Image (cartoon, rainbow, N blue to C red):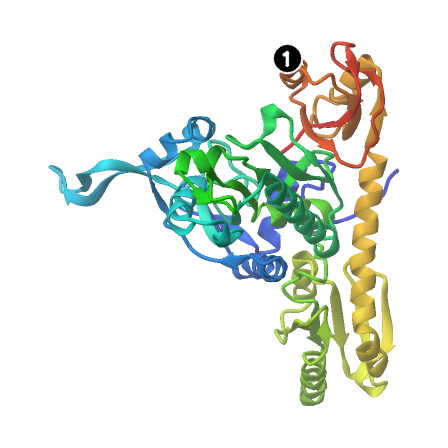
Amino acid sequence: MTKHVKTAITPTRQQDYPEWYQQVVKASDMAERSPVRGCMIIKPWGYALWENIQHELDDMFKAAGVKNAYFPLFIPLNFLEKEAEHVEGFAKECAVVTHHRLEKGPDGGLVPGGKLTEPLVVRPTSETIIGDAFSKWIGSYRDLPLLINQWANVVRWEMRTRIFLRTSEFLWQEGHTAHATTEEAEARTAMMLEVYARMAEQYLAMPVIKGSKTAAERFPGAVDTQCIEAMMQDRKALQAGTSHFLGQNFARASNIRFQNQQEQETYAWTTSWGVSTRLIGGVIMTHGDDDGLILPPRVAPAQIVLLPIAHKQQEQAKVMDFTDALAEELSHIRYHHRPLRVEVDKRDIGGARGWEWIKKGVPLRLEIGPRDIANDAVFVGRRDKPLKEKFSMSRRQFIDEVTTLLDNIQTNLLDHARAFQTAHTHTMDNQEEFYAYFTPANTEKPEIHGGFALAHWCGSGTCEARIKEDLTVTIRCIPFDQEPQPGKCICCGASSSRRVVFAKAY
């Protein structure tokens, strides 16, 4: 008989993965549903994680010459109508403001009054309104390149929502650039995708595949969409970031023109790129276990939590003094160019205190009691190791080696996630095997199956649509890191020169 192991999170990942995810969000105190349907309240622990992601990305953007700005939340409807393909792609997701005030209705309640002359769209993305500004700021090649980013919220009126992964309102950054040549714009598109890949792998410990989207999966109005795709523990893909080469499409719609060095007037080449709070969902689903969240040290809201333990009144002052002195010393240590983030939890709530920090995913937990103080030591638990696997270290040794310990946890999380992705990525050439791979063997748990399939595709939109209809599987990307390889399309058998990544996705 298999011994039942009690876990902090129920159900477990194997029992009900979607519900496990919701319970981890709740248990880690990251976010909760808001009174507004489809929206979320990001709580301090979740927002601190977003701030850390934001700080690291912002530094990378600025190192790449990008400057921050802010643009209006409301976009005139006629701006969206200028780019037909763009508005068609977002039309069903747009929230629209039609009135500018509230009035008392016949029954005493409030009703909209003051109808607007032109409806305003709550931004689903800002290409059109930023394009309007660019058209005024750019007149000569000397004004280029123009490299702008904004940190903002956007609204996409989703019918089926899940906290962090898909909500009607979410936080993100959107970069927008304009260039004098197509080569410069294409290079910027690739550069920003590399920034996102670096963030995902080096900071979030989330391995990704880089590639281009098919025409059917591109950003509306883009010439090329490049993306990073990550595998979650239910083996579905998560699109973790996108960078779009827009050609001159949006420049023509917004009249972004400049005089080049030959004194000829031409349209600029533009790009846009963005990541969102969806990354937090990715961290949860890449690293979380059946006891809660596991956070990569480089972005964790706190990398260390100190848990003083004093059962007797006469021990408390000594234990607290030792703990406070250690916290002070640790706070002066720098870890990846930032001070260590240290929490001290002095609450007297028994074992529940330690479990709270386990569920929150703090990389290192330090228990400090009278015996530890007598030995000038600390008792250490690593969140990436089994919970009972704790060890004692001298206080001095811990201080000297804490950054090495954190780097070891960071590397361990990435290696574990990369091994999982590799184990569930399969090269396929047989259609029957391909269909079986994405068809649940257990109808009670339809989410537990499949992974990434590397299979040939002829380039036909018809084949792509058929596979999507049959299996709800999409082409996640056409990977960059592959050599041309002749083969036959997994759908129709026609000649193909490359493999693509097929997967079910969020």
SS label for mark 1: helix
401 relative to 88 in the view: left or right: right
Q: Residue at x 68, y 88 (%)?
A: 321
Residue 188 spot, x, y in % from top left: 62, 46
Q: Is residue 31 above or below residue 123?
A: below
> Is residue 16 something one can see in this rendering?
no
Residue named by callout 1: 462
Q: Quadrant of residue 444?
A: top right
Camera-nearest residue between 473 and 202: 202
| Tally of marks | 1
Q: Residues within 10 Å of mark 1 (few under 14, many from 20)?
A: few
155 relative to 477 in the view: left or right: left
> Is residue 221 something one can see in this rendering?
yes
Q: Residue at x 83, y 79 (%)?
A: 400
Camera-nearest residue between 104 and 48: 48
Q: Quadrant of residue 94?
A: top left
Q: Is residue 306 above or below residue 211?
A: below
Q: Residue at x 61, y 55 (%)?
A: 28
Q: Residue at x 49, y 41 (%)?
A: 268
Quadrant assignment for the N terminus: top right
Q: Is residue 340 above or below residue 247?
A: below
Residue 459 spot, x, y in % from top left: 70, 18
Q: Farthest front residue?
A: 262
Q: Farthest right residue?
A: 1
Residue 99 spot, x, y in % from top left: 22, 39
Camera-nearest residue between 76 and 395: 76
Badge 1 amino acid:
Thr
Q: Is residue 431 above or below residue 121?
A: above
Q: Quadrant of residue 422?
A: top right
Quadrant assignment for the C terminus: top right
439 relative to 104 in the view: left or right: right
Residue 124 spot, x, y in % from top left: 44, 39
